[in-house]
Image: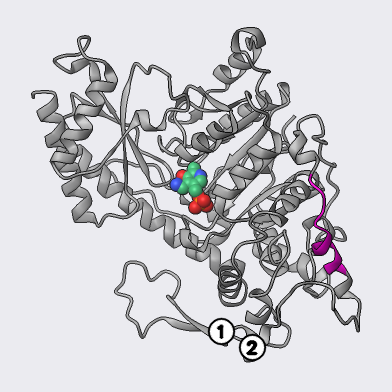
């Protein structure tokens, strides 16, 4: 059964573990969580092994010979004539100055003067700090990602998720995108199906198709994937009729799901986890919007529920992740800095069992190697040396308040400008997407024209009004599925408040034209 979920650890708890586990030495891939926390962690079971699920490609990956040899560099006095690392004295970068804003300055006019300069350069290596600097970060690294960023990510994962089994680890990825591609290639064989929400992140589908694999969608409501529907799909799977073995990979976006904005409640997550246990599924928990969980929308006249400002309350206010209830080690959690810091940083990570992480490291070694050294060093300076874990939580607290405000602006515009008899929605509780249902059956030519045709008409009418919204069918897990409902996705991620309102006004005009209101 799923673990009972304890309160989140605090930043102080993790700092205490960090100090107990001794000073950080840096070095080569040594800071895996299981080693790092071994001396301090309370007893936890070991994870399941996944040999029966790994595919031939993944099983045949060998450790990179030269990367492996790097372990000898930690022997004191070793002179290396071994690897192909260029001398850092020839790198044409001496230091980088990065101007960072003060935490929580989003809404006030941030002036150039009010920010702070973060200096990254050789002479900036401070006593007791990580000694992770340009000369190190810009050289070849390890398939885990740099030991310093990995350590920070591991501590962060422990603060937020504290997975309930012993041998969990983190490995960096080049954003969630590379992680997803690698995870699929670890388990799937041509012809396999992957289960996902009925509407899902387009890249998750587009990554599967060239591998000869298809997504099969499960119905969802405002709380995400329906556990009964998932169970039914698996119970009734007919290998002969489907021409494929019973699927065992479940891809889900539990918070602020892309495109529907659905967020799974704790109970829903527990139910999904139980179904996964029953059918021995591996869950890919893709959570770029996890920290953008908002307070429920209370309507424009009701007073807004205040957002917790305190770090511990903030952590408790987040719906626990599937990773947090993962007693078996069947969740591969995919995290990314894209939506909370900057997508161009291309830094993300997975958290999974040591066995799965080891396969991922082998794949990293011969593909991306690790995220860019520039990105890693800048993020590490910001997250570890400038903000620390507590400062990062403060950043997230402020960020989610910003997104809550944006969501409310979009919802008010929808209330004001979309025809109520045609457009309806459930206010999103996380993320950056608003999923608008269009009552397609009220179209004058409904029946004579297909839903796809009407959807395309409305899309083009919106473009003619100068607003871009995304038709729901673009996100269909199964590209051939015939849906009997119609949706459009609008994002409140980036347009300014006034532009967002204007955009919805234009979309309302397009609906009125197409539906001849
Ligand atoms: N997963 C989901 C659900 C997303 O919505 C996105 C971005 N749209 C990504 C992954 C991609 O994230 P990254 O930039 O980390 O590759």
Residue 19 image point, x, y percent = 78, 72
Q: Quadrant location of residue 149?
A: bottom right
Magenta span has 70?
yes
Magenta stretch secondary structure, dominant: helix
Residue 275 image point, x, y percent = 66, 23
Which residues, given as a range, are shown in magenta? Answer: 61-71
Proximity of marks 2 and 1: CB atoms separated by less than 8 Å = no
Please name the residue that numbered disc 2 is placed on. Answer: 122
Q: Nearer the viewer, residue 499 or 134?
A: 134
Q: Quadrant location of residue 55?
A: top right
Vertical placement of residue 191 versus 118, above or below: above
Mark 1 sits near ligand 1, with its Cβ under 8 Å away:
no
Instruction: Residue at 53%, 35% (x, y): give it.
Output: 265
* SS at mark 1 in the image: loop
| Cα distance in 3D space between marks 2 and 1 | 10 Å
Q: Nearer the viewer, residue 319 or 340?
A: 340
């Amino acid at each position: 059964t799923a673990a009972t979920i304890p309160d989140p650890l605090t930043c102080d708890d993790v700092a205490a573990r960090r100090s107990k586990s001794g000073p950080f030495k840096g070095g080569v891939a040594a800071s895996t969580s299981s080693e790092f926390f071994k001396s301090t962690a309370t007893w936890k079971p070991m994870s399941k092994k996944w040999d029966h699920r790994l595919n031939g490609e993944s099983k045949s990956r060998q450790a990179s010979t030269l990367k492996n040899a790097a372990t000898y560099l930690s022997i004191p006095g070793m002179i290396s004539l071994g690897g192909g690392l260029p001398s850092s004295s020839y790198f044409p970068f001496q230091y980088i100055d990065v101007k960072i804003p003060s935490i929580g300055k989003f809404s006030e006019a941030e002036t150039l003067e009010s920010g702070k300069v973060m200096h990254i350069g050789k002479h900036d290596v401070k006593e007791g700090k990580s000694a992770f600097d340009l000369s190190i970060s810009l050289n070849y690294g390890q398939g885990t990602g740099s030991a310093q960023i990995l350590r920070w990510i591991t501590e962060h994962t422990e603060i937020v998720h504290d997975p309930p089994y012993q041998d969990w680890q983190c490995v960096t990825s080049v954003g969630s995108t590379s992680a997803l591609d690698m995870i699929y290639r670890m388990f799937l064989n041509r012809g396999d199906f992957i289960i996902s929400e009925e509407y899902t992140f387009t890249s998750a589908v587009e990554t599967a198709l060239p591998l000869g694999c298809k997504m099969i969608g499960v119905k969802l409501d405002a709380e995400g994937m329906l556990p009964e529907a998932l169970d039914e799909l698996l119970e009734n799977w007919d290998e002969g009729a489907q021409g494929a073995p019973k699927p065992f990979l479940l891809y889900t976006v539990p918070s602020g799901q892309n495109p529907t904005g659905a967020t799974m409640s704790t109970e829903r997550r527990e139910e999904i986890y139980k179904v996964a246990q029953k059918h021995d599924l591996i869950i890919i928990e893709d959570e770029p919007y996890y920290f953008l969980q908002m307070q429920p929308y209370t309507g424009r006249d009701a007073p807004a529920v205040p957002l917790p400002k305190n770090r511990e309350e903030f952590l408790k206010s987040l719906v626990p992740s599937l990773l947090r209830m993962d007693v078996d080690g069947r969740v591969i959690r995919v995290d990314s800095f894209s939506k909370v810091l900057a997508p161009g940083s291309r830094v993300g990570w997975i958290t999974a069992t040591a066995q799965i992480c080891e396969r991922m490291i082998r794949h990293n070694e011969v593909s991306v190697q690790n995220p860019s050294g520039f990105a890693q060093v800048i993020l590490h300076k910001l997250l570890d040396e400038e903000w620390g874990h507590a400062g990062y939580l403060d950043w997230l607290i402020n960020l989610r308040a910003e997104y809550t405000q944006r969501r409310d602006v979009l919802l008010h515009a929808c209330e004001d400008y979309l025809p109520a008899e045609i457009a309806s929605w459930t206010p999103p509780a996380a993320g950056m997407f608003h999923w608008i249902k269009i009552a397609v059956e009220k179209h004058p030519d409904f029946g004579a024209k297909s839903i796809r045709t009407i959807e395309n008409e409305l899309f083009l009418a919106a473009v003619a009004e100068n607003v871009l919204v995304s038709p729901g069918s673009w996100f269909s897990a199964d590209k051939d599925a015939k849906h009997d409902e119609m949706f459009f996705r609008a994002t409140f991620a980036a347009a300014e408040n006034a532009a967002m309102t204007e955009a919805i006004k234009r979309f309302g005009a397009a609906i009125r034209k197409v539906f001849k209101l």
